[in-house]
Image: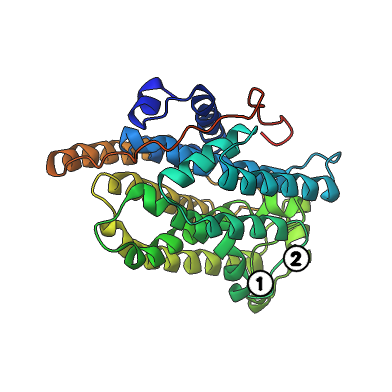
Amino acid sequence: MSDRELDAAGIADPALRAAYRQCRRLNARHGKTYFLATRLLPVEHRAAVHALYGFARWADDIVDTLDPAIGPARRDAALSDLHHELLSSLQEHNSREPVVLALADTARRYAIDHGLFADFMTAMRSDLRVTDYATYADLRGYMHGSAAVIGLQMLPVLGTVVPREEAAPHAAALGVAFQLTNFLRDVGEDLDRGRVYLPADLLHAHGADRRLLEWSRTTGRTDRRITAALREFEALTRGVYREAAPGLPMLAPLSRPCIRTAFVLYGGILDAVARQGYSVLHRRAVVPRVRRAAVAADGLLRVAAAHLRAPRRPAPASPPSLACPGEPCRPVPEEVA
């Protein structure tokens, strides 16, 4: 993370600066679409977004590791350790883990509801034992903790021009829309991890099931029943984007270009899935670089226009310095970074 971003955010403590830089590296490495959109935020708010993403990414990587040496028991223990470290940091203002240190600092600066982090950790733990969902309602219940809360965590950072509770349902829907998009794009990869996020009743409506997905993944062959189910899942996801869309103008003007860019780019993944014939069991759909560049350029123009129209909202005042108690902060372990 650049000194300019950290200075603008009022982050002076050396341990905190190192922690936020670690979160930024996680974002840049794993969340390319999200990272690109984040570059459009006012400079003083980027560090907080990196902290929120970095923590979510770290927990997700614990759950999703494909390393056969790290079995369910070790992953469950790692999640428990992470949750305990988070609770301790939120309450006692210290942590030896960089990602937790940055997240706790962000939570204090922006007064983010701690319950949102608890709900997220509950969803992560469910991924260790739940491998499929009978209905879309069941999936939405899981996504409250895995996705909707991410949108709600972001709201205090982004700011709103309406009461926050008015914007909250749309922010939650956008988090869900992004995750549904990832589920559609990553059907094959999730199947390799033993999970199916396509609701069983949706699959059955088209004559498909887990066994058919596994057959397609193994053989590389397509099946019209799978294609029909994936097409319906795409349509369902686009409906959630429509739920989220009214929330964009509710955001603070300088935040809108960032979220609009993410909205368009993630929606572009759906377009790529359809364009590639719903072959997500065999290859990953990506938004073409030319399209990404064009959307980013449009976002930059919107940022410039927003700066002309609105004063910049200052970053929250720095809370008491967090420091790692008695020893240097440890780096994120390689197995979960």
Q: Nearer the viewer, residue 103 or 184?
A: 103
Toward the left, the furthest residue is 309
Q: Is residue 8 visible?
A: yes
- Residue 214, image x, y percentages: 77, 58
Q: Quadrant location of residue 169?
A: bottom left
Answer with left or right where residue 208 lies relative to residue 232.
right
Q: Using the image, determine if residue 6 lies above or below residue 88.
A: above
Q: Using the image, determine if residue 18 lies above or below residue 106.
A: above
- Residue 205, image x, y percentages: 64, 78
Q: Report which residue position mark 2 lands on.
A: 210
* Mark sitting on residue 45: none
Q: Report which residue position mark 1 lands on.
A: 203
Answer with left or right where residue 80 lies relative to residue 185.
right
Model colouring: rainbow
Q: Quadrant of the C terminus?
A: top right
Q: Secondary structure at mark 2?
A: helix
- Looking at marks 2 and 1 on the same chain, the residue that comes earlier in the sequence is marked by 1
Q: Nearer the viewer, residue 93 or 128?
A: 93
Amino acid carrying label 2: it is Arg
Q: Using the image, determine if residue 43 lies above or below residue 14.
A: below
- Residue 249, image x, y percentages: 25, 58
Amino acid carrying label 1: it is Leu
Residue at 70 percent across and 36 percent down: it is 336
Residue at 72 percent across and 66 percent down: it is 132
- Residue 270, image x, y percentages: 47, 55
Q: Nearer the viewer, residue 227 or 232?
A: 232
Q: Quadrant of the N terminus?
A: top left
Q: Secondary structure at mark 1?
A: helix
Q: Are marks 2 and 1 in contact (CB under 8 Å)?
A: yes
